[in-house]
Amino acid sequence: MVKHPPPTPPAAPIVVDALSKTYGRGADATPVLRDLSFSVARGEWVFLVGPSGSGKTTLLSILGCVLSPDAGRVEVLGRDVRSLSPQAAAELRLRNIGFIFQRFHLIRGLTAQENVSVPLTLQGANQTVARRRADELLAAVGLAEHRHRNVRKLSVGQCQRVALARALVTNPDLILADEPTASLDGEHGHAAMQLLRELTTQSGATVIVVTHDPRIQSFADRVLKLENGQLCANQSPLSPNTPAPRNLGTDEIRSIGEFTPTPPEEPQNEPEPMLVVE
C-alpha cells in the first residue's frame, strides 16, 4: 500500500514577528508598537484590548495593510505586508479583508442594498449579481424589508447590521473590526456580536476585534492585551461565571437597532490613524 504524506496544515492567516512601529522622527519620534510577536489561526476570534494610546488601532491598520511596519515581519493571508505595493495592498483589502468601523462609514446617499453591494461592484461583479448577494446578507441580518431604504433613515443598530453585511459580502478570509459595539448599548452590542459570530462561523473567516467593551469579550477565543505598545497578556476571555454565546432567534435579530444608542467613548490623544479602506 502506498503511504501518502499527511496533508500540510493551512498557514496561519496572521503571522506577526518582532513588529515595531514609530510615528515621527528624531526628537519627535513616538514608539507606538514595540517588538510584537503572535499568530492567529484560521477561523480564530482574537480581541485586542488595552488603554487608549496602547497601539491597538495602529496594529489593526497594519493587519489591514493600511500601514506598514517599520521593523519586523507581518504576514497577512500569506502576503508580506512590507513588500506589498500600494496597488497590491488595495487589491488584498478589496478581495480578502472585510472591515467593520466604529462609526460604520456607510454612504449616506445610498440604500442599504447599495451600500452592501459596493465592495462587489468594485471587484467588477455584475450589478444584478452584486445586489442579489447583498439581499442575501441583508436577509441574514434581519433587514430584508429595509433593503431599499436610505441608510439615513435607519436606526444606529440597523446601520450596524448593514455594516456587518457589507463586511461579509465578498466572503473575506479576514474580518477586522474597530470598536464594533461602541455605538450600541450592552444588549444590542452583544446581539450584534452574536450575529457576526454565527455568520463568520459559517464562512470560516478569521476575526480580529479592537474593543474597550468587556461585555463582549466572551465571544473571543483569545484576548491580546496591549500596554505602551507591548503585548502584556495572551489569555482566554472566558471565566466560570461568563455565559457562553447562544444562537439568536429571528425576533432578536430584528430587534437589534430598536434601542437608545450609547455615545462612543471620546478618543484620547494618541497618534493612531483612522482605519480606512481607500
Image: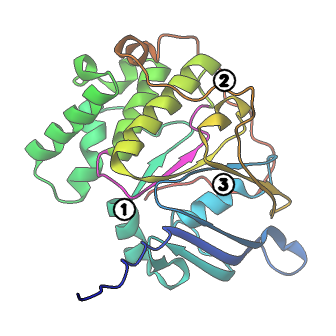
Query: Which quadrant: the N terminus?
Result: bottom left
> Which of the image's four quarters has the C terminus?
bottom left
Colour convention of the picture: rainbow
Rendered location of residue 195, percent (x, y) = 44, 30
Q: Residues within 10 Å of mark 2 (few under 14, many from 20)?
A: few
Quarter of the figure with residue 7? bottom left
Stretch in magenta: 169-181
Quarter-of-image position of residue 14: bottom right
Kindly report which numbered mark, 3 or 1, lies closer to the viewer in this rendering.
1
Secondary structure, mark 2, is loop
Residue 264 versus residue 72 in the image, above or below: above
Instruction: Please tell me which of labels 3 and 1 falls first in the chain.
Output: 3
User: Where does the image place residue 185, in percent across and percent down from the top left?
Assistant: 62, 19
Q: Nearer the viewer, mark 2 or mark 1?
A: 1
Q: Label 3 sits on what residue type?
A: Thr
**Structural distance between the alpha carbons of marks 2 and 1:** 31 Å
Circle 2 residue: 263
Looking at the rendered image, the disc whose residue lies closer to the viewer, 3 or 2, is 3
Residue that mark 3 sits on: 57
Q: Marks 3/2: CA distance?
A: 19 Å
Q: Hey, what amino acid is under mark 1?
A: Asn
Residue that badge 1 annotates: 96
